[in-house]
Each structure stands twice: as C-alpha cells, then as structure tokens.
Image (spheres, rainbow, N blue to C red):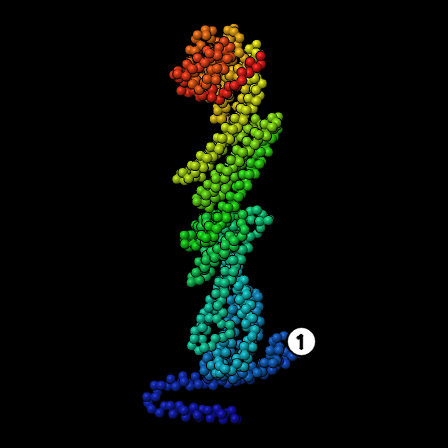
Amino acid sequence: STMEETDREAVATAVQRVAGMLQRPDQLDKVEQYRRREARKKASVEARLKVQSLINMSVHGAAQITLNLSGNEELRKSHLHIMFRENLLIIFEYFKKITFKLFQNNYYSCSPACFIVLLLSFPEIVRETQDLIERGELLQAHRKLMDLECSRDNLMYEQYRMDSKNTHDMNLIHTYFGDMQKLSEELAKQLWMVVQRSLVTVRRDPTLLVSVVRIIEREEKIDRRMTDRKKQTGFIPPGRPKKWKEKMFNILERTVSTRIEGTQADTRESDKMWLVRHLEIIRKYVLDDLRVAKTLLDQCFPPHYDIFNKLLNMYHQALSTRMQELAAEDLEANEIVSLLSWVLNTYKSTEMMGNSELSPEVDVNSLNPLISQNVVDQLLSKYMSTLTSNIIGWLRKALETDKKDWIKETEPEADQDGYYQTTLPAIVFQMFEQNLQVAAQINEDLKTKVLLLCLQQMNSFLTRYKDEAQLYKEEHLKNRQYPQCYVQYMIAVINNCQTFKESIISLKRKYLKLEMEDTLSSSHASMDATLDIIAKEGCSSLLDEVFMDLEPHLNELMTKKWLMGSNAVGTICVTVEDYFNDFAKIKKPYKKRMTVEAHRRVVVEYIRAIMLKRISFKNAEERKEGAERMIKEAEQFRFLFKKLAAGSGEDTEGLCDIIEAIAEVIKLTDPSLLYLEVSTLVSKYPDIRDDHIAALLTVRGDASRDMKQTIIETLDQGPSQPNPNYVPIFKEITVPTLTVPKLLK
C-alpha cells in the first residue's frame, strides 16, 4: 500500500542520513547530540502540523458557532453574536497568520494548541471571570484576567514588531479583546470598595484585604515590566500603567476626608453644642481608626507601603482642612474656645494623638500644627472682641435685673450670717469664673488677658452701680413711702460692696500670676475706691433716713417745751435703736462706721440745737435745770451708743463729753469764773469759734455784751490742749446771725 511505501522511503532516507553522519570514528562520540537535534526537528514539524489542523478546525468551528448563534434569538441580539458574526472569520484568518510567527520565533511559552484554545474560549473565560468577581473570589478572577491580558498584550506586541503602522490589525485585536477592559474596571470597582471599608474589613475579614493588596502588588509588577519594555521597544499595551497602588492611596485619602467631614451631625440651629459634639466624634473616630490601623491594618500590607504613616498623614491633612473650614465660619465666642482648645490641646493630648496605644509610631512633637499661628491669632482676637461686648452686655443685664429687685415689697435675702445681699456679685463673678475657666483651657496667656478684661469691665460697671445707687436714693427722697424696703435694699447694696471686694481679691489670687500683680494694682485700687464711695454714700443715705425721722424731735431740743420736760431725747434714742436693728444686717466694717457716724451726728445735732439760741435761760434755777437735763441726756446717748457699738471696740466716750462740758459752762453759778470755764472748753475743743461762744453765752442768758466781748478777746491768746484723738466737731455747726429768740418774744 501507499502507506507502507512511504514508511519504507522514510526508513531508507533515515539510514542514508545516519550513514552520512557517522563516517569518521570520532563522530561516534556525538551520537547523543545528533539524536537530540533530530528529536527537536521532529517535534517542531509535529507542532506545526498540529497548529495547522487546529486552525483549520477553529475556522470550521467558528463557522459552526456563527451558524448556531444565528438560530438563537436571545444570543443573536447580544454583543457576542454581533462580534462573532462580523469579525470572527477575519480574526481567525489573522490569528492563523500571526500565531505561526509567534511560535516560529518562540515568543510563546504555552503551546500553540493551548494558545488557540485560549483564543477560542475567550468569551467563556470572560463570563467565568465575571462570575468570580460577582462571587467575591477576587484572586481567581484576577488570575484569569491576567491570562487574558497577557495573551492580548503579546499578540499586540507581535503585531507591533511585525508592522507598527498597521492600525487596522491592531484595532482588530483590540476589538476582539474589548470586554476585557470592562472586566478590569469591574474588578477595580470591587477592590476600591474593599479599600474604602478597609478599617472595617480588616476586623471582619482580613484575608479579603490581603487578597486585594496582593492583586494590587501583581498589577504593580506588570506595570513595571511593561514600562521597562516600553523604554526598550516603544510599545505599551492599552490601559498601562494601571497605577492601582496610587489609586488605592487616593481612595484611602478620599475615604478619610469623607469620614472626617461626615461627623458633623448637627448645626447651631438644631443644637447649641453642635461643635463640641462634632469635635468629640472626630476625636473618637480618629483615635479608633488609628488604633486599628496600627494593630491590624499594618499587617495586611507589605512594609514598603508604610501604610500606618501614610494613613496618619492623611488623617492629619484631613483634620487640618476641616479645622481651617471651621475656623473660617462665623463662630460664637464659646465655639472659638471649643475649636482652639481642641486644636491646641486635645489633638496632641493622651485622649487622641498622644494616646499610649499609638506610640512610638505617633510622635506628637513632630506633628505640624492643624491651623497656622496666624489663624489662631485671628480667632483669639475675634474671641476677645466678642467676649468684651458679651461681658458689657451681661453686666448691663445683671444690673438691670438687680435694680428690679430694689423696688420689691419683700426684703432681700440674707447670707448665712444674716447680712442682707442681692445676687448681683454672685452672678457677676460666676460669669467671670466661667470665662476664665474656659480661657484656661486654651493657655495661660489668654487666661491673663480675660482676667484683665473682666477687671477692666468691672471698673466701668462699678461706676454705673454707684450712679444707680445714687438715683435710687434720689427717687426715694421724692416719696419716702416708696420703695417699701428702701432701707433693706440700700443695706444690701452696701454689703455687696464688701462681697465685690472679697471676690476681686479671690479672683486675682486664683487666676493671676504673682509677677502680673503690679499691672493690676492701679485698677484694683480704683475699684476699691469706687466701692468705698458706694458704701459710704449708702451708709450716709441711711443715716439721712434716720435724721429725717428725728427732725421733729431734734427741733424740740433747747426749747421751752424741752425745758418743761419733753421726751424728745427718749424718742430720739428709741428711733435710732429701731433703725439700728435693721442696720445689724450691715456687714461689720460698714456697720462700725455707721455706729460712729450716727453717734457723731446725734451729738452734732444736739450741739447745733444749743447754738440755734432757741432758748435763753432767765435765771440760775433754769440754768441749773437745763444743764442737768443736758448732762442726763448726754448719759442717755452714751448708754445708747455703747450698746450699739458693743463688741466693735469703738471708743465713743469723748463725743458725749462735749455736751457735758457745754452743760458745765451753762450751769456755772459764779459769773466771775465764767472766763475760766469757757477757756477750759476752748482749750479742749480748739475748733470752737467766737460765734459759738457768743451763742453759748446768749443761751446762758446772764452775760452782757461787754462781758461776751471781753471773754472772746481774752480767749484768743489762750493755749489749746486738745485730746489727740479729737475730731473737730464745731466746724460743721453754723450759728444763725439773727437772734431768733428775741424775734420770737
């Protein structure tokens, strides 16, 4: 048969060739080498034959597929059908041509059969890869995608080498592998979803994250290979380099920014504390995220990714951006403090970046400021100006509220020691305290500035307080029945002065450094002076109340009625004591002053009554009776004021002595001794003027004009020996020039 003949020919030819190879003895050594060479040739011929038959089969198969597809309604409409119908036969003709070249030149690592199968089954592999992506089996999906891309890229590369200007054939390959680009994008989308949720994924399914990182690493390797080949050959496949590592970091960066921005749940309208809440959520999230990044995430990435430090920088950058946005908003004073306190203190504290779980990777000292010093200064400046207007407003409002209390029909409240007070000092200093505590959260410097501001505003406020107390008094004088509790509220105003003084001292002690003490000494002195004036004027106005009530009784002194036995002084003592029951609610330093002042004024008014010359004694009997009454009344006053000054250690003896000394002059029975008695009086009380002596002698009723003149002229030369503690009293007393008693007669 023909087959046997062919075999015989082949054997004969082979024998001939072998005989030709082995003609010399030394060629026997190379038998093994010849055998290997022949085996290679044989394999090559077989391979070519195989490829040819495969390609023939493929073209036939493609035609069959095309015919089959035409009959399927659903597939006919699909993209696959169109592609196959229009391009398949052309593509296979092209593949037949290029595949031979590839394998002739040993470009392909896999066998031609393998390669053709891959090309033929491309749509099927695409579908399988799609399924793997949907099932989340990303590593396997990527492995298939890499195989497909490798086939396409090598085909394109070979086409490029054969004919780099032939765009038609290049487009043909591109079209055939068109679905692959979508696959790559679909896979990428899945990767980025995992990356976006990496801090959650790393806790629940770290292997998924590791897979994603491995895929990115593979792609990076291919990118590098393709880029290197481009440098040598000028060719790079479409879509390369993919730069998936760079994209991953961009996705992470966007995720971090979104996480920071998304923490603001409220606005000022819905919640006054919106910013505090916002900052606290940020603090918590960032700390939690970085803890996870350090303990878990770091292990899922190769060391050269430096993932923790990269994330740290992203968070720092996102926070910096967010803080700058917040700083640019129209913040209220308390919001500025919340922001600055967070930026300058909380951020680097152990509650956040300084947390021990983040060290040593996070070094707070090497972190850049979240906002520039310039922005900090602008915020502080805005805070101070807002605070200034706020404090002015608060103080004004506090005073207005306090004034409303002054006209109440109920007594003011008393402190634990029973002293009347209003809530004003407590409200004012509580407000100061709150603002100082807030400022202290930021830094020492701001705290000092706020303290200076508080005290400076306090200074102006006290001047207004003084004016309001004065107006209160004036309004009351227009109608003394109103307000009903005038005396009690004026006492409260006086006591508030003491509370203010103590509060200023304690505020300075608590918030002011010693070295700053001098800067405040003048304003402190000024405030103390104002408070003293308010208290003094308050005390004075209360005494005016007393003496307005005493006026009718004081008018009875040194009159005929008085001499006949009126009880004016008894009534005076009872009225004073009654008022002083209320005055017991005045704090000690002011109460002591009140007692002294009341005592002094009673004595002054009594002496004034003598100097008014309302009576002129007719004889020694009347003089004796009048003088004894005066001595008795001086004793009543002495007793009263001793009782009122009990425990204050105040020496009030001397004042009543003046009344007694005058009584001695009036009582004197021997006129020749009158000069001596008067000169004793003058030496004790050197501020007695001539008109006082003249009035005194007029009341005595027995001294002639000449006698008065002689005594007065002689006295001018006499030495004075006043008591060193004596406070001049006569200089306050004027003597009327008209002799009223004579006119009345």
Question: Is any atom of residue 628 visible in this view?
Answer: no
**Residue 673 at x, y = what percent?**
43, 8
| Frontmost residue, 601 versus 510 | 601
Count of residue discs: 1
Q: Which residue is found at the position 48% from the left and 75% from the top? A: 236
**Residue 33 at x, y = what percent?**
38, 84
Q: Which residue is found at the position 66% from the left and 78% from the top? A: 71
Q: Relative to residue 734, is residue 513 drawn left or right?
A: left
**Residue 355 at x, y = what percent?**
45, 50
> Helix, strand, or loop for circle 1?
helix
Q: Which residue is found at the position 46% from the left and 50% from the top? A: 377
| Frontmost residue, 277 versus 445 | 445
Q: Which residue is found at the position 46% from the left and 33% from the top? A: 528
| Residue 518 image-quadrant placement | top left
Please name the residue that numbered disc 1 is placed on: 73
| Vertical side of 226 occupied by 633: above or below | above
Q: Relative to residue 729, is residue 120 drawn left or right?
A: right
| Vertical side of 715 occupied by 148: above or below | below
**Residue 572 at x, y = what percent?**
55, 17
In the rendered structure, which amino acid carries the disc numbered 1? Answer: Glu
| Mark 1 nearby-residue class (10 Å; few <14, some 14–19, many ≥20) | few
Question: Which quadrant of the rendered structure holds the C terminus?
Answer: top right
Question: Is any atom of residue 40 visible in this view?
Answer: yes
| Vertical side of 90 occupied by 741: above or below | above
| Frontmost residue, 454 versus 657 | 657
Q: Spot the residue most to the left.
A: 26
Q: Relative to residue 22, is residue 476 drawn left or right?
A: right
| Residue 411 image-quadrant placement | top right
